Amino acid sequence: MDVRRRQAKIPQSVKIAAGETPMKPHNPKASDALPLPLNLTNGLFFTMFFSVMYFLLIRWREKIRNSTPLHVVTLSELAALVSLLASIIYLLGFFGIDFVQSVIYGSNEDAWDVEEEEEEEENEKFIIEEDSRMGASPATTLGCAVPLVPMIPQQPTKVPVTEKPGPLITPLSTEEDEQIVNSVVEGKVPSYSLESKLGDCKRAASIRREALQRITGKSLEGLPLEGFDYESILGQCCEMPVGYVQIPVGIAGPLLLNGTEFMVPMATTEGCLVASTNRGCKAIYASGGATGTLLKDGMTRAPVVRFETAKRAAELKFYLENPGNYETLSVVFNKSSRFAKLQRIQCAIAGKNLYIRFNCSTGDAMGMNMVSKGVQNVLDYLGNDFPDMDVIGISGNFCSDKKPASVNWIEGRGKSVVCEAIIKEEIVTKVLKTNVAALVELNMLKNLTGSAIAGALGGFNAHASNIVSAVYIATGQDPAQNIESSHCITMMEAVNNGKDLHISVTMPSIEVGTVGGGTQLSSQSACLNLLGVKGASKESAGANARLLATVVAGSVLAGELSLMSAIAAGQLVKSHMKYNRSSKDITKISS
């Protein structure tokens, strides 16, 4: 391989071997096309190439948005194309000629290139090409009297390029993908049908993502696409995916609950939340642990039906509430699933409209789909004896799902759990940095009296929804059900002659499952496995879901204990200023 080096000026004392006249062949260079120095020539054409290319990309993007044919060009675009072609020819010629020269002259190990340049302070300068396979130095080969001083190769001039945002048009892997993207942009192919047409969920998400960027003109850079199993969400978790959102998962624990230690996964972006819950777990652990008790287990669905008269609606109400008909209705309802077991039917009338609230156990599933199928079976059966019944909706909001409602607060929905612990006086002082009397007074005035003044519905607590949401997201639950699942009343009182603190949380409507929905995704499944409740219980149907609900209540107990202590000790603002504020310069980020 030949290496070209530009040597320093040769002093006059350097002598050429007697009788030898150095050859000075002039090898063609691409820069000879312009009467400019090499650096300026390169800078000119590099700048022309990138500027024109950027201009054309902008113009082509606008045409794609406006559905303008790409072959229709304006005068400025024509000039830009000519300039682009000229710069490409020059750059290919410049690098191409150098490559050909290296091949041709590299075949002759004794060949040396000498180039003479006219300059004001030097008479001649030699350019020496040295074959890497020859061990002789340039000075010896040329017969010089003194050795030549090696010089560092001249670095090409860097052309400053203005930083631009990432391109909205992402290069696709195949021409076929590009055609599909264009079809989606033009509305010829529905975005929702890509998975079924392509048979590749990852490819469908990539194409949909690119089409979305071109349609909206907004970049999705920063929203991850790689590293996710899109097959796992097809038909059950999310439609028309274009990526996924990353949420950090922290661990609070160990939580000592019913004699068992649990490490609780919490997915959140709120600083201090995991640390605070972890402190509550520490206080509970040091005091001997907490005790959780399951009170009820039943999911609900309440359709609304209408009759011609209120009397007929009342007749159906009496029929459903008659104990003699319960067994028959249970058989019809339970056909929907081997895990569905009808427990209770509760009715409410509004004029000639009847709301029927079915309550049933659902095994380890959260159970909304299961109970809905059972309700549909019963409605079809009732249509035989009540043909004038008009089913308005499978859900009449008497359930009540994903909305704050007194019926859930009073009757319960999902799992109803109470969790309690006695925190020793020294733990309150050393770990929680407060005292029992202060906590009891604060709970009375804040969680009870303050919530009553605010007209709270199931919100007699400090921040139960914080912990519920974090655990729900980490374990694949429905985050929207945080609304009723966070119904909680926190109670505190001094015990053992006022030395120790008894704290409890009562949560009547925790809606969780360990099978179905988001629980089967790999990340959420790993968090369930950490708690020991992954999948369906093999010993007892519904045991894993009930245990998960108890862990949620125990985690809320820890969170309530720690936050209330921080407020009582005046540490809330200080801790959030330290752990819940970004250290980044927001002005630089926005710019």
Image (tube, grey):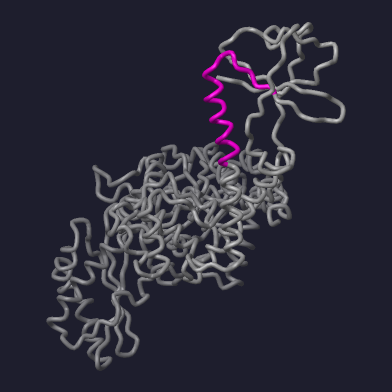
| Residue 295 position in % (x across, y down) | 36, 56
> Looking at the image, how many numbered discs can be counted on the residues?
0
The one nearer the camera, 281 or 150, is 150
Q: Is residue 130 above or below residue 433?
A: above
Residue 19 occupies quadrant: top right
Can the viewer see residue 253 in this picture?
A: yes
> Chief secondary structure of the magenta span?
helix
Observer-nearest residue: 23 or 457?
A: 23
Residue found 17% across the figure and 78% down from its top: 382
Most extreme residue toward the front is: 19
Q: Is residue 84 above or below residue 286?
A: below
- Residue 357 magenta-drawn? no
For residue 286, above or below residue 569: above
Q: Residue furthest right?
A: 121
The one of 42 and 51 positioned closer to us in this rendering: 42
The verdict on residue 113 being magenta is yes
Residue stretch in magenta: 92-114
232 left or right, relative to 279: left
Q: Quadrant of the N terminus?
A: top right
Q: Is residue 555 left or right of residue 452?
A: left
The image position of residue 534, as x and y in percent, is: 33, 44
Locate residue 396: give its quadrant.
bottom left
Is residue 202 toward the left or the right of residue 422 in the image? left
Q: Is residue 581 visible?
A: no
> Residue 11, image x and y in percent?
84, 16
Could you tell me which residue is drawn at 31 percent across and 70 percent down? 301
The quarter of the image holding the C terminus is: bottom right
Residue 452 rendering spot, x and y as whole percentages: 58, 70
Q: Residue at x 28, y 91 (%)?
A: 310
- Image vertical order of residue 550 relative to residue 77, above or below: above
